Image (cartoon, rainbow, N blue to C red):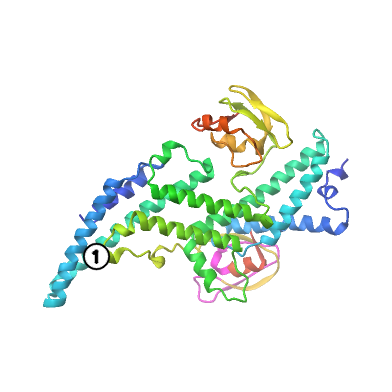
Amino acid sequence: MEESLEDESLLDDNGEAELTAQTALQEIENAWMNETFAPEILPHQSDLVDCMLQQIAHMEENVKRLDKNDLRALVHRMELDRIRYVISSYLRTRLEKIERYTIHILSEEENRNPDEEPYLTPDELRFAKEYLANLETLFKTVALQHMPPNFQQFEVNKFTVKPNVQAHVFLRANQRITGVVVPGTLNEEIDFEEGSQHIIQYSAVAHLVKSGAVQLI
Amino acid sequence: MFGKEAIKLITELDMYEDIRPFNEQVMRQVFKEMQSLYEANLIDSNAIQNEGNNELLPSVHFRHTALLRNKRCILAYLYHRIRRLRQMRWELGSILPTEITTNLLNAEVQWFQNYNKSLATYMKSIGDNHGLNLTVNMSPPKTLYVEVKCLADFGKLELDDGEIITLKKNTYHLLPRATCEPLIRQGFPPDNPDIDVGNVHLRLQARTPKILHLYP
């Protein structure tokens, strides 16, 4: 009984799939926390999301085969609900950032080096573009066209809202990191020990968050 | 003059948290003010150019600032209204109650519909086009089932496992949280096409503020 309560029992029979399902869940939780606490939008994790969603569909099939009043079915369904919440909340947070910082995010995407991976998925990018176009249409039809001639512009640079990267974040170091420059000082550097926790300005650790060297908490 | 009207729009946003009837009257006054400021500036700047009358420069600047401020106030007004509208989309679903739609401009309704479309397209694309409804699972799940009191005759509700139950007014049920979460949040049919709620009933219920009520 104890053994059958484990998630793995519902997953694939071969050992590899069990491992990936567990780590994928851990990773999506990490991505979710990072996205929630970081002021700016982070590189997308759509592979992870797709993988987890497939996993959920798979587990759901398995749960359906169990008897409805089976205790295991209840436990598993609860777990599925939790995972689904994490994924939804993660994607919702991203959408909220896209809506809030639309212009800023779009221009960042445009100026990104072509060799670099884009931060938005193609679908998020389309959503962002539609959102901006929609806003522009509204502004133009209701207000701008009724204004004097040289005030009718939709001034993209004036409407830009930027995330506050000076906000402070809590973090835990996943590995030993040396020489993080403390912002606002001349060149004061600090080191993070593995597993240690800190509060620091987001801008100082943004690259570490994206590389996965630190985890926001 | 000089932004006094425009600030009324901002005050209105500040005073009421809901969406008020669109303040077209004040808006039109602001446009009028902008027009007259603009015309005054046109005359003065011509005078500066033709006659070199630099004494007029400060007043041109002043009017220009007032113009910019007016523009900013109006756009802020529009922007915050649609942010509220956006919030409604997430809380109430894709069909707005008439109490709200009557307060909107056509252009705002259009905005809402476009937003709906973009959001639906995006949600459909998640997970290799399998789709995921992001407007459910809004809060962390604590239990699988919740005890609810039914506030209105809703009719038949099909649960995920195919079981059909009838929701009658003033009855108590223990239901799967995921299924009734949308019904608890609002009085409208859930967006989820998997839940068949019967169109006839939906129309009748659209005005009820809430169908289910968490009990106790």
Amino acid type of disc 1? His
Q: Give the residue number, with chain letter if any, for mark 1.
A: B64
Mark yes or no: residue A33 visible: yes
Position of the N terminus of chain B by quadrant: bottom left
Q: As drawn, is B86 to the left or to the right of A197?
A: left
The part of the chain drawn in magenta is A182-205
Mark yes or no: residue B216 visible: no
Q: Residue furthest top?
A: B170
- Verify whether residue A189 appears in magenta: yes
Position of the C terminus of chain B by quadrant: top right
Residue found 52% across the figure and 29% down from its top? B204
Query: Looking at the picture, how far across and down is residue B177, in whole percent?
Result: 66, 36
Query: Looking at the picture, how far across and down is residue A173, in whole percent?
Result: 67, 64
Q: As drawn, is A4 to the left or to the right of A114?
A: right
Residue found 70% across the figure and 30% down from its top? B164
- Verify whether residue A195 appears in magenta: yes
Q: Image height check: is B164 above or below B14?
A: above
Q: Image height check: is B100 above or below A86?
A: above
Q: As drawn, is A9 to the left or to the right of A41?
A: right
* Quarter location, residue A78: top right
The chain identifier of the residue carrying mark 1 reads B
Circle 1 SS class = helix
Q: Report crowding for label 1: few under 14, some 14 to 19, many 20 or more residues within 10 A (C-alpha).
A: some
Q: Image height check: is B201 above or below B57?
A: above
Q: Image height check: is A46 above or below A67?
A: below
Residue found 41% across the figure and 51% down from its top? B80
Query: Looking at the picture, how far across and down is residue A116, in whole percent?
Result: 62, 74
State how many labels appear: 1
